[in-house]
Amino acid sequence: MEKSITKPSKSSSIVVGLDIGTTKICVIVGRKNEHGKVEILGLGKAESSGVTRGIVSNIAKTVKAIVHAVDEGSSQSNVDVKIVNVGIAGQHIKSLQHRGILTRKDLSNEISRRDIDKLIDDMYKLAMNPGEEIIHVLPQEFTVDNEPGIKDPVGMAGVRLEANFHIITGQVTAIKNIMKCVDQANLETQDLILEPLASSEAVLSDEEKEAGVVLVDIGGGTTDVAIFHEGIIRHTAVIPFGGNSVTEDIREGCSVMRNQAELLKVKFGSALAEENKENEIICVPGLRGREPKEISVKNLAFVIQARMEEIIDHVHYEIKSSGYEKKLIGGIVVTGGGALLKHLPQLIEYVTGLDCRVGYPNEHLAKNETLSKAIYEDLKSPMYATGIGLLIKGIEKEELNALRESRPSKKVEVAEAPRKNRGLFASLLEGTKKFIKDDISDQDFLK
């Protein structure tokens, strides 16, 4: 019997996260339940063969994988998936700090959200290098009339409003290719979200963000880094190495096929060679008519450790260059598929000198009786941290939009002062008649 497809009602706020990764394309359908937890309704995934190091390299293959994942997610959740929250990563992602100043003319009124919006709009007008465009403008702390360190100035009186901004940029062509893939899969984009920001929502607690913490998301093609301190994002970076680099090293170092190298990494891989015994041997089937190959588990670990040390060194460099190395009480939280590698937290602690734990996204998940136990257990894996994070970000945006619709006075205020084009994401959607009401959430102001 064929399932009837139901469109999500406004009250249920069903949201979809689309993670376009190097190894897999993942669609997660869910909503927030009455207890504030995320209830997953469906999971769809497909092998990603059209993405290289976080960047779309083959549009046709990527579209095919997105369609397959969406179909699977739709049939599981019984929801007609049309609007998605898309993640973006890749080596082209860069971040910079900038300071903005606004002198207010209307001194009789207190500082409003419109003043902050104007300050953010000005940041989108910054001159970028050719081919680069601003993706996110994240306010850090505000200064009102030379009074620094204010997190939320709304409601205060003041003439001179200043703010430090963390600005994230990306390549125009890479962003356009992602948008083209989503469009060709007959989907609309609600929001374009930097993947380490999404992952942080899924695996970091507010206490960790306040204390100072580094999120390291080791994916297939890239390793994403996000540094938080005092609840505010301070630094972001994307390192162009990930789990696939380890697999390639095993393939070359042990002279095996790529699929065998992946299996060796997943089943027997370790990030610390000293933790393995000398006499442990793996027997790998040879090619047709050839003898099987014997590989030492310790030698396999040496190959893996060399590459993981290189990735951790890059992460350590980003931590040092951020200037927050001595302020990270929360240490490092490692997530993504690469976090499943045995003994990885110990290696990270040894190289960086910081505490380390593996980040699982199960803290936010509610038990759903309609989902099979296998899928629910699967979702607790660090490899789904980005997808669940995109879902959480989408739920936050839905709640924000609902709040704005329930306050008509705010609506009139925005109508009197229409927002200007806020970067490439808005202009891309404008071309296809898909408009965004607001691409900066209230959550961003509070961070």
Image: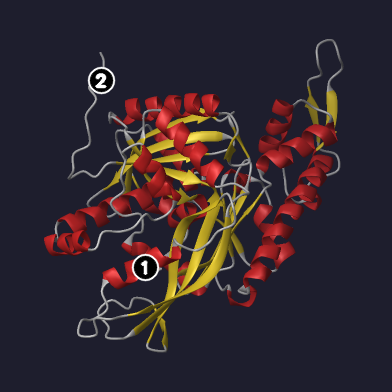
Residue name at image x 37 percent, y 31 percent: 372
377 relative position to 435: left or right: right
At which x and y percent is residue 316?
69, 64
Q: Is residue 184 above or below residue 246?
A: above
At which x and y percent is residue 328?
58, 72
Query: Residue 359 versus residue 232: which sits nearer the camera?
Result: 232
Query: What's the residue type where badge 1 is placed?
Result: Phe
Please, what secondary structure does the residue beneath circle 2 have? loop
Q: Quadrant of residue 251?
A: top right
Query: Residue 273 versus residue 103: which sits nearer the camera?
Result: 103
Query: Residue 317 versus residue 164: which sits nearer the camera?
Result: 164
> Tag count in the figure?
2
- The mark nearer the N terminus, 2 or 1, is 2
Any mark on residue 3, and which? Answer: 2
349 relative position to 31: left or right: right
Query: What's the residue type where badge 2 is placed?
Result: Lys
Tell me if I can see residue 377 in this picture.
Answer: yes
Q: Quadrant of residue 250?
A: top right
Q: Which residue is mark 1?
A: 445
Tell me if I can see residue 374 in this picture.
Answer: no
Q: Nearer the viewer, mark 2 or mark 1?
A: 1
Q: Is residue 362 above or below residue 268?
A: below
Residue name at image x 19 percent, y 62 percent: 416
Please, what secondary structure does the residue beneath circle 1 have? helix
Query: In the image as oriented, which residue stretches furthest toward the top?
Result: 289
